[in-house]
Image (spheres, rainbow, N blue to C red):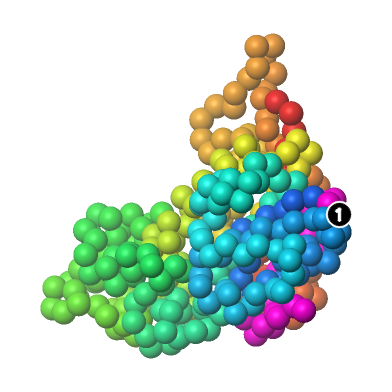
Amino acid sequence: MMMINKNYHTPVLLKESVDGLNIIEDGVYVDVTFGGGGHSKEILSRLGQKGRLIAFDQDKDSKMNLINDNRLLLINENFMYLKKFLKLNNILKVDGILADFGISSHQIDKPDRGFSYRFNSDLDMRMDNNNPLSASHILNKYSSEDLNKIFKEYGELNNSSKITRAIITSRKKKNIKTTFELNDIITPFISKRNSNKILSRIYQAIRIEVNNELGVIKSLLEQSLELLKIGGRICLISYHSLEDRIVKRFVKTGKFEGEIEKDIYGNFSLPYKSIGKLIVPSQTEINRNIRARSAKLRIAERVRV
């Protein structure tokens, strides 16, 4: 029996991403972003009785979507600890890894999580409630320099310094506690024409810092080099340029920065081979799920180096 809550999250690029894994019936696979269980359900439907699926999700709410299948193990932890928890379960190598880096609809639409500027709630934005760092702490305790860096780098905002100054000025009078208080502070610096887009970028920047999202993605990619069998596949769904740049460069070069390594013969030493071209949602999928519109899927295969 599969207890999937369809209102929790609609899986993006479902067929394309699971097709990309090129599933072996008796293989071992990892869904590092279980969420509503949609991708996991599809993977299980293609596995044989001896196949295994290990799923990760640090959000404890994901347990409400538990799939009753003895081939599945759900681990309520951040996937930055992927290697550690696989090893604890006697798994050293896997045949495929799937990651959907988007925030779930459940997290956005649940007002008390503080992820959305549309609801008045405490400034939280933690994907893991055990995380000691919240949006409120960042906005009220971070230095002007650190705040400006977050908005400039993670929000890609041209007026990051103005927004930072407004926050610093406001918090000197009283702590910024709610999303609507934050909105009131930054709205004067946003044009009405682009207000939703800019607000989304500001909230994105804070959320990335709270959850160390880019660092976690890098950690996953580095661990994948050791965990994936030769010929194994990794399917990665990103939603904004910061994520996609990291994924694209790593798939292409096996590195996040610097020169590509060469072997003793002068040939490039590349751990991954790109499979196909960049995949984006069809207009039909976007019409059905507007939150899929910015998704980008990259598929790569582990090769011998």
Q: Which stretch is magenta?
A: 1-26
Taking depth in this image into account, of 285 and 64 the one nearest to the observer is: 64
In the figure, 72 relative to 119: above or below? Answer: above
Q: Is residue 262 left or right of residue 175?
A: right
Farthest bottom residue in view: 120
Instruction: Name the residue carrying label 1.
Output: 25
For residue 59, say whether it is visible.
yes
In the figure, 140 relative to 287: above or below? Answer: above
Farthest left residue in view: 173
Residue 193 screen position, x and y as percent: 48, 79
Query: Residue at coordinates 79% horizontally, 64% vertically from top-left?
Result: 44
Which quadrant would the C terminus be assigned to in this image?
Answer: top right
Task: Indicate the amino acid at tag 1.
Answer: Glu
The chief SS type of the magenta part is loop
Residue 54 screen position, x and y as percent: 66, 58
Q: Is residue 257 magenta?
A: no
In the figure, 114 relative to 248: above or below? Answer: below
Query: Residue at coordinates 68% horizontally, 55% vertically from top-left?
Result: 30
Q: Is residue 42 left or right of residue 33?
A: right
Could you say which quadrant of the image residue 32 lies in? bottom right
Q: Is residue 62 left or right of residue 68?
A: left
Find numbered disc 1 in the image and state the secondary structure of the residue it sits on. loop
Residue 258 screen position, x and y as percent: 51, 30
Which quadrant would the N terminus be assigned to in this image?
Answer: bottom right
Taking depth in this image into account, of 124 and 261 the one nearest to the observer is: 124
For residue 235, say whether it is visible.
no
Query: Residue at coordinates 62% horizontally, 65% vertically from top-left?
Result: 74
Residue 250 screen position, x and y as percent: 61, 40
Query: Residue at coordinates 68% horizontally, 30% vertically from top-left?
Result: 270
